[in-house]
Image: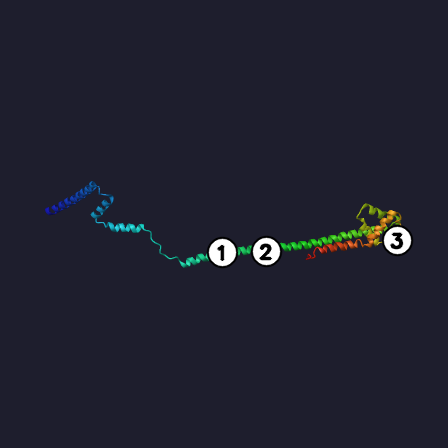
């Protein structure tokens, strides 16, 4: 038992001596000015049996970024290019659709314009025919009225018509031409004064020139001339 106690005491003294030696070494290095933080860590690593170089290498390996040596995925590149081409195709398709819709709208507007012009032309023709029919009926009614009057009264009415309206000559010519030969002869025989003879001469001159038939033909010729190609 005494031997065991002596061995325990010796071990305790040895531990105390080791600690004292470490303290003395630290104090010596600190007083000399060469004891730095790094050297302190190195000394402690030696005391506790730590491999300082292995730890330093491990830390450096952790700090260095890992190089990405992975090659790009070809399938991913192909997919990205396909998506770009697909998006471009969609835009081109949308543009073509917009152009086609615009053309259809333009064609529809042109068709509507053609139908409108056709309807307007037909309406104008019917309106013109109606107006001409009304005027012709009115002239025929005036003609019949003048034929029913006394020749002298008929002459006076004709002169009054010419006096009121400068454009009444055309209607007077129509009325005189439509009269029967006997009635026309009797009415014209009443134009006796110099002024009346001059009016009668003007009426006969208009009949000779074919008024109003020549005026109608002239207007039609002028309208057709508008569609003639320009002369070179």
Q: Residues within 10 Å of mark 3 (few under 14, many from 20)?
A: few
Q: Residue furthest top?
A: 31
The residue that disc 2 covers is 103
- The nearer-to-camera label among 3 and 2 is 3
**In which quadrant of the rendered view does residue 39 lie?**
top left
Does residue 154 appear in the picture of this structure?
Answer: no
The location of residue 95, given as percent across then percent down, is 54, 55
Q: Residues within 10 Å of mark 2 (few under 14, many from 20)?
A: few
The answer to the question of whether label 3 and label 2 lie on touching residues, with beta carbons closer than 8 A, is: no
- Which residue is depicted at the point 56% across and 55% down? 99
- The nearer-to-camera label among 1 and 3 is 3
Q: Residues within 10 Å of mark 1 (few under 14, many from 20)?
A: few
The location of residue 132, given as percent across then percent down, is 77, 52
Q: Is residue 232 left or right of residue 27?
A: right
The earlier-in-sequence mark between 1 and 2 is: 1
Q: Is residue 60 left or right of residue 134?
A: left
The location of residue 80, given as percent across then percent down, is 44, 56
The residue that disc 1 covers is 88
**In which quadrant of the rendered view does residue 100 lie?**
bottom right
- Which residue is depicted at the point 65% across and 54% down? 113
Mark number, residue 203: none
Q: Nearer the viewer, residue 139 or 229?
A: 229
The residue that disc 3 covers is 185
Q: Residue furthest front?
A: 232
Disc 2 element: helix
Location of the C terminus (image quadrant): bottom right
The earlier-in-sequence mark between 3 and 2 is: 2
Does residue 121 appear in the picture of this structure?
Answer: yes
Q: CA distance from mark 3 to mark 2?
A: 69 Å
- Which residue is depicted at the point 85% across and 51% down? 201
Disc 3 element: helix
């Amino acid at each position: 038992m005494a031997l065991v106690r002596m061995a325990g005491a010796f071990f305790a003294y040895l531990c105390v001596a080791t600690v004292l030696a470490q303290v003395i070494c630290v104090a010596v290095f600190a007083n000399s000015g060469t004891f730095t933080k790094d050297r302190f860590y190195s000394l402690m690593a030696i005391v506790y049996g730590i491999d300082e170089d292995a730890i330093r290498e491990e830390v450096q390996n952790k700090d260095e970024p890992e190089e990405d040596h992975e090659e790009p995925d070809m399938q991913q590149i192909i997919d990205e290019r396909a998506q770009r081409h697909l998006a471009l195709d969609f835009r081109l398709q949308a543009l073509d659709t917009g152009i086609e819709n615009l053309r259809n709208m333009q064609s529809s507007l042109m068709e509507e314009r053609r139908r409108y012009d056709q309807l307007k032309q037909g309406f104008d023709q019917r309106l013109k025919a109606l107006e001409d029919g009304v005027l012709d009926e009115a002239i025929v009614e005036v003609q019949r009225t003048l034929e029913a009057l006394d020749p002298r009264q008929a002459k006076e009415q004709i002169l009054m018509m010419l006096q009121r309206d400068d454009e009444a000559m055309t209607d007077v010519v129509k009325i005189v031409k439509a009269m029967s030969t006997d009635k026309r002869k009797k009415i014209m025989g009443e134009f006796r004064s110099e002024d009346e003879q001059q009016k009668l001469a003007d009426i006969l001159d208009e009949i000779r020139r074919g008024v109003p038939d020549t005026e109608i033909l002239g207007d039609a010729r002028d309208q057709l001339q508008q569609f003639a190609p320009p002369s070179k």
